[in-house]
Amino acid sequence: MEYGFSLQLRSNGAILAPPCPSFSGRNCLPFPSSSLKQTHPLLSFSLHFSKTTPCKATLTSATSVGTTQVTEFNWDNLGFGLVPTDYMYVMKCSSDGIFTNGELNKFGPIELNPSAGVLNYGQGLFEGLKAYRKSDGSILLFRPEENAMRMIDGAARMCMPAPTVEQFVDAVKMTVLANNRWVPPTGKGSLYVRPLLMGSGPVLGLAPAPEYTFLIFVSPVGNYFKEGLSPINLIVENEYHRATPGGTGGVKTIGNYASVLKAQKIAKEKGYSDVLYLDAVHKRYLEEVSSCNIFVVKGNMISTPEIKGTILPGITRKSIMDVAQDQGFQVEERAVSVEDLLDADEVFCTGTAVVVSPVGSITYLGKRVEYGNSGVGAVSQQLYSALTSLQMGLAEDHFGWTMQLN
């Protein structure tokens, strides 16, 4: 299905041109938004492009009108893999922090100079968040402003300009609504939203790129681990390390993830679900699973490794800590040793992709320890149910974390 867009050029509120005959090099339908509603009942957009302004994209949020139909798809067999959708969002920024206006393009390949900073020196960040469809057809975002602030922090570490919180959130809204039909039905999954910030300008010597691209694409997803909510089996890695003190382990830069692939590949070949990394100094204290934060439960106490620059400050991690305290658990951030792990009553992981994933067993130096008779632990189940009920709009959000897109 194709969608039409009405685009006008404005300066200080004055229309400089009528709806244009082209949109980013692709044909656009030259009729007003009222006609769009009749011809394309799903979506209507009016994008207003002003003169270049420092770090501000002057666009209006997309609005959903008419039907909220979902595309025909085998939602029951939805896994965690890329499903090409309709649109992606692109916004450019030069090295002096001057952003141009963002736009929606059809989802597809992008063009990069071979000497782009992201390709040669890994100058790039990404984020991950989800959109959920409620039973009434409306869509919920979960804490997108937290992702925006984390990208700003990461960009500072990587010498990159970043979109403002407002720009980030508006772009996420626009992208999700443009791909409305790909948000799975209630209870069938979620729409995974992947914002990227990268040094797209050409650079040969080691230096920050002269131009940056902020891009968002989306894909409907199911469970990250094939086990779903069933327990996963982890192996503790004591040779390879994910991050070191003073490095970039605390920001969501792309290089952090390529470095875990080898250990993860070896672990999966041995039948494990994933790898749990130790600190690089003492090789004794827990840090992260490849793409998840880790929690250990002992009695009524839930402990997780403290944030000290080598561990990503996960948004799901932060949310689970608040939910756990709200439900009467004690929660602490501290140095968690391997001994604490092996003595725990229960262990679970958290992350945007996995939400909460119970750990059924840990293998460390050839010794295997199982938790909860290899079933889903009571604490993991309780926190998973509480958080997902908030994310999907099934419970009252007294935290104020969700954002509804009508």
Image (cartoon, grey):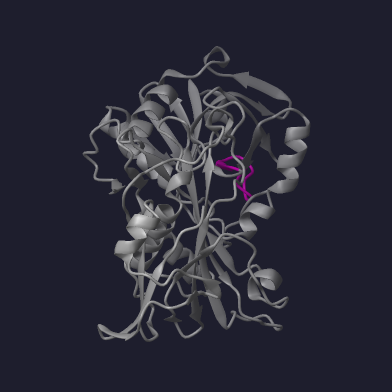
Any part of residue 61 in sight = no
Q: Is 29 placed above or below 217 here?
A: below
The answer to which image quadrant residue 243 occupies is: bottom right
Q: Is 82 placed above or below 270 here?
A: below
On the image, the x and y values in percent for residue 210 come to 57, 83
Residue occupying the point 24% across, 38% down: 397
Q: Is 220 placed above or below 99 here?
A: above
Q: Is residue 362 magenta?
A: no
- With 223 as the anchor, is 65 left or right in this view? left
Span of residues in magenta: 278-289
Residue occupying the point 52% across, 50% down: 311
Q: Nearer the viewer, residue 148 or 72?
A: 72
Q: Is 190 placed above or below 48 here?
A: above
- With 345 as the anchor, is 390 left or right in this view? left
Q: Is residue 282 magenta?
A: yes
The answer to which image quadrant residue 14 occupies is: bottom left
Residue occupying the point 64% across, 50% down: 242
Q: Nearer the viewer, residue 32 or 70?
A: 32
On the image, the x and y values in percent for residue 324 come to 33, 32
- With 297 as the anchor, is 64 left or right in this view? left
On the image, the x and y values in percent for residue 58 come to 34, 75
On the image, the x and y values in percent for residue 226 come to 62, 29
